[in-house]
Image: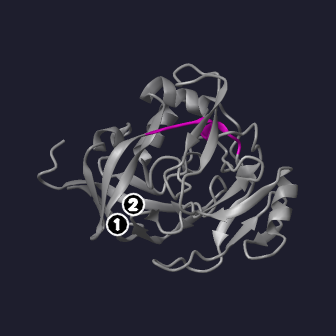
Amino acid sequence: MSSTVPIDLGTVVSLWRYPVKSMMGEELTAAEVTERGLIGDRSYALVDSSDGKAATAKNPRKWPRLFGFRAAFIEPVRPAAKVPPVRITLPDGTAVTSDQSDLNRILSKTLNREVTLRAAQRGAVNAEEYWPDMEGLEHRDTVTDFTLPEGTFFDAAMVHLLTTGTLDRLRELYPQGHFEVRRFRPNIVVQLASGEKGFAENAWVGHRLAIGTTVRLNITRPCGRCVMTTLAQGDLPRDPGILRTAAQHNQVNVGVYAAVVRGGAIRRGDSVRIV
């Protein structure tokens, strides 16, 4: 795939950010992109008071209810400004905010585990991942530790892209599965102009993408998937077949990771090109 001449890939059809790590997030019509990804994305996380590790649905044995929480910013998020407070909706529908004094007590009681809501700070934080007993995974039926990128609550990279063509291909391969955007938690969903049903993003790795008039991303690597994709959330049932299909047909990858070369504003409907 030559990058000497711009190649039109498609358009942005949805944008997502997740104010609190491993909670349900917000769908946006537009967003500002900085070197830290979509502004406000993974700005907060729950931290286990007993071991200092970030709470993540990657270890559902320890954190079985995180996908029952939803987080949204109370105020607009602005570049170079302090991260605004968030509103967190608990699994029972109760809403709390990050600036109320009893927040950590309420969250700890709901999760039955002592936690503190924290904004991303300098230094590295560890988290845990449970690997189900499934062929094709790097580990099987075990829990491993991993370190989040310095000063962030991201698992691996600042931006995650996914195409509708990949979801369509996965649905063909496993028709009984519910392959919805929510399962994969991308930031940017691209509808391919070609109408292709396949893992098109694999060919983007090592290339630079232009989104709209300003934003430039370097596609760094495929996005390896984990047990999170199999978990129940909302009306989506628990389904190990989601991850198994990715393992059998695309080396456990769904979508790609990217680094921000140049930030700026993006919105739904923006063109996506290889440059």
Q: In this view of the protein, which residue sits in the foreground, 61 or 102?
A: 102
Residue position for label 1: 270
Indicate the quadrant containing the C terminus: top left, top right, bottom left or bottom right: bottom left
Secondary structure under badge 1?
loop
Type of amino acid under label 1:
Asp
The residue at 82%/54% (across/down) is: 114
Type of amino acid under label 2:
Val
Indicate the quadrant containing the N terminus: top left, top right, bottom left or bottom right: top left
The residue at 80%/64% (across/down) is: 104
Q: Residue 18 at what x, y percent from top left? A: 58, 60
Q: Is residue 264 in sight in this rendering?
A: yes
Secondary structure under badge 2?
strand
Q: Residue 148 at what x, y percent from top left? A: 53, 48
Against 98, residue 60 (above or below) is: above
Q: Is residue 234 in sight in this rendering?
A: no
Q: CA distance from mark 2 to mark 1?
A: 5 Å
The residue at 39%/54% (across/down) is: 190
The residue at 52%/37% (across/down) is: 225
Q: Residue 273 at what x, y percent from top left? A: 25, 56
- Which disc number belongs to residue 12? 2
Q: Is residue 61 left or right of residue 163?
A: right
224 within the magenta span: yes
Q: In this view of the protein, which residue sits in the foreground, 101 or 195?
A: 101
Q: Is residue 274 left or right of residue 57?
A: left
Q: Residues within 10 Å of mark 1 (few under 14, many from 20)?
A: some
Q: In this view of the protein, which residue sits in the foreground, 80 or 19?
A: 80
Q: Give the extent of the magenta segment.
A: 223-232
Q: Residue furthest left?
A: 4
160 within the magenta span: no
Q: Are marks 2 and 1 in contact (CB under 8 Å)?
A: yes
Q: Residue 61 at what x, y percent from top left? A: 75, 36
